[in-house]
Image (cartoon, rainbow, N blue to C red):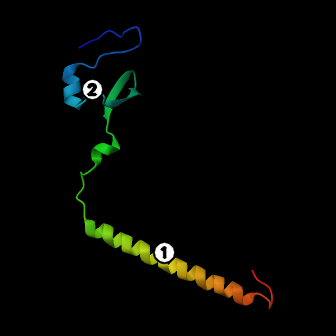
Amino acid sequence: MTHKVGPKGQVVIPKEIRDQLGIRPGDRVSFWCDGDAVSVRRVDDIRSLAGCLPSDPDLAVELLAERRADREREDAREAAFGALLADDQPAGRTA
């Protein structure tokens, strides 16, 4: 099957090939040279992957709890370090 390149360098992808590749109006495609040929592929948008993996809300809750505990430990370390600095100040001077 052959097609003529238009004045703007455009070529229509035949319907049979669009159907085979799942290309619909508005889809993005990528082109690349493959020797002396040009190849085309439909580009999957990352948003199209939403919901394709099973979700486990318990893991999300666990992660949030770990992050909260990490933050509390970091805050305690910063407070202890601040107290050490304050103890090292000579009498009558402030940090």
In the image, residue 74 lies at what x, y percent?
53, 77
In the image, residue 30 lies at what x, y percent?
37, 30
Question: What is the quadrant of the N terminus in the image?
Answer: top left
> How would you rate the neighbour count of disc 1 (Cα within 10 Å): few for under 14, some for 14-19, many for 20 or more?
few
In the image, residue 94 lies at what x, y percent?
76, 83
> What residue is at 23 percent from the left and 31 percent from the top?
21
Circle 1/circle 2 CB separation < 8 Å: no
Q: Residue 57 falls in which quadrant of the image? A: bottom left
Q: Is residue 75 left or right of residue 68?
A: right
Q: Is residue 26 above or below residue 88?
A: above
Could you tell me how many numbered marks the image carries?
2
> What residue is at 27 percent from the left and 26 percent from the top?
25
Using the image, tell me which numbered label, if any, was put on residue 18. Answer: none
> What residue is at 70 percent from the left and 86 percent from the top?
86
Q: Residue 90 falls in which quadrant of the image? A: bottom right
Q: Residue 48 falls in which quadrant of the image? A: top left
Tag 2 residue: 25
Q: Secondary structure at mark 2?
A: loop
Between the C-alphas of marks 1 and 2, the distance is 48 Å
Front in this rendered view, residue 69 or 8: 69
Q: Secondary structure at mark 1?
A: helix
Which amino acid, mark 1? Arg
Sequence-earlier tag: 1 or 2: 2
Question: What is the quadrant of the C terminus in the image?
Answer: bottom right
> How would you rate the neighbour count of disc 2 (Cα within 10 Å): few for under 14, some for 14-19, many for 20 or more?
few
In the image, residue 4 lies at what x, y percent?
32, 9
Front position among marks 1 and 2: 1
Which amino acid, mark 2? Pro
Q: Is residue 23 left or right of residue 66?
A: left
Q: Is residue 51 left or right of residue 28?
A: left
Front in this rendered view, residue 16 or 60: 60
Tag 1 residue: 71
